[in-house]
Amino acid sequence: MNTKTHMLHPFKKFIWLICLCSFLFPVFSSAQGTLKDGNAKREEIQRYFGYETLMYRYLTIPYDLSMNTNERGDFVDIGFLFLILLPLLFFIKYREKWWVLIGMPILLLFLFVISTSNGFIFQHSTNQLLVNNSGQTHYEINGESDGIAMIIIKAMYNVNNAIYKPFNALGNAVSGEQDYVTYPLVLLIFIGICALLFFNFRKNGSWFKLLAASLFLVYIFFWYILSSGIIWYGFFGWLLGVVCMVLLLPDNTKSTINRWTYMGSYTIIGLWIIVAFVSRMSNINPGGGAASLGKNMVNPVFLQQVVGKANEKQILDMFYHDLGSATKKINRDKNALVYRVGTSFSYFIDNNHKRVFMDNQLGFFRRLEKRYPDKQERADVLKASNFKYLIIDLNTPTLDNTPEQSLVDKFNGLIEFVYKNPKVKLLATNRQVKVLGPDGKPTNKLAFNIFGKVVSNGTFAIYEIL
């Protein structure tokens, strides 16, 4: 018996056992969407996953993660290497198979069409995201304001959306917020990749490559169906993905295509490392504005603390107006509870694991609002429950990607609660507004407040419940 072939049997049995067990789950249950009506899971978790038809929600994950379609920021950015190199290296590795030469481009084109039809275009001239919702958007081309690149992109998206129409009709027919199609489809794709894997390694008997690829596939499969697209649940999988990319590189570079593949792949990886390093060192953040790009490598406030020119309270006040004074007062009331909606200010509150109640999606506040419609009575209820302070993240509405904007609606209810409510008192905020005059019109006088003509939106507000 061939020893190398014999070594593959445990891995083969392991993979097919995983496939069999996984198949039982979608057979006896449907792939579930999340509820509407202000459901916190839909607002918080599903924003990483998307709000399109459930089947396409799963199929577009590779593109959405690489392009940050659903959530944008460094904390969800895995870069473009996986999206570019894994399909490309796979294609080159099996280029001698006719069905790969035909099937791979068709599959990639299909994934591109359904992904971009549920994505966006960033328009530099207006600094705006032009959302493409289920392929329904028609992009108007303006030759005067659009550059040549934007003209090409808009035209491509218009053609792409036309191609997507039958796929959209198919998705709406077989899927929705829940279905019996998505999990079996994902499972069949996974089994097909596993079958190709074993067919290939049965010939060359490379047990190390088989082990690495098997671990990658199994880990990514369960991350794929269980994580709702949340990137940090798959960190180990991305490490294995890098290993698989290296293993897919040609073993020899005698042929021209292998040589170019080898050099090109390492060139792309090297360029990505340089770009990522410069981006992080320069502290370039989305939405920061062109004037501030690369100017915040070192925060001068930290330097003042290092050289001893400012104490902790002064440092906090430099970052956030009056935050040091507010947290000092909160920490004096050692037994008072704090109602927190967003922000990371728990860090500055003593015994925060016992005192801070988090309601980031305002689900509890909405129930409280329904039970006690009068806002003064609501404040009395909170005070009777030993809540004395309320911390509000003013950027909470920006987290709402739901079509129905349920989090925005709940946040508006929270703002209505503190508006002209004699039972609450503003302690600190970094929102700057123009003060309203006796005639109700904005004056040129500026003040730190929540209500008025906003000059600088700010990020937080802290109230005391009287």
Image (cartoon, rainbow, N blue to C red):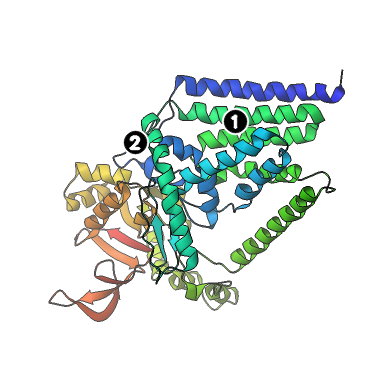
Disc sitting over residue 190 in the figure: 1
Q: Residue furthest bottom?
A: 444
Quarter occupied by the N terminus: top right
- As rendered, which of 435 and 255 lies closer to the eye? 255
Residue 376: x %, y % from top left: 18, 53
Say the numbered circle drawn on residue 408. Answer: none
Direction from residue 44 to residue 304 in the image, left or right? right
Farthest residue, direction top: 1
Left or right side of 336 for 153: right
Q: Give percent across and percent down for residue 208.
A: 79, 35
Q: Which residue is mark 2?
A: 35
User: How far across and down, in percent of the image, does residue 107 sit?
Assistant: 56, 39
- Under circle 2, the secondary element is loop
Classed neighbour count for the residue bearing mark 2: other residues with Cα under 10 Å, few (<14), some (14–19), many (≥20): few
In primary-sequence order, the first of circles 2 and 1 is 2
Left or right of 105, for residue 315: left
Q: Nearer the viewer, residue 392 or 308?
A: 392
> What element does badge 1 sit on?
helix
> Left or right: 189 with respect to 451?
right
Question: Which amino acid is tagged 2?
Answer: Leu
Q: Name the quadrant of the C terminus.
A: bottom left
Q: Name the mark nearer the viewer: 2 or 1.
A: 1
Q: Is residue 323 above or below residue 112?
A: below
Q: Quadrant of residue 391?
A: bottom left
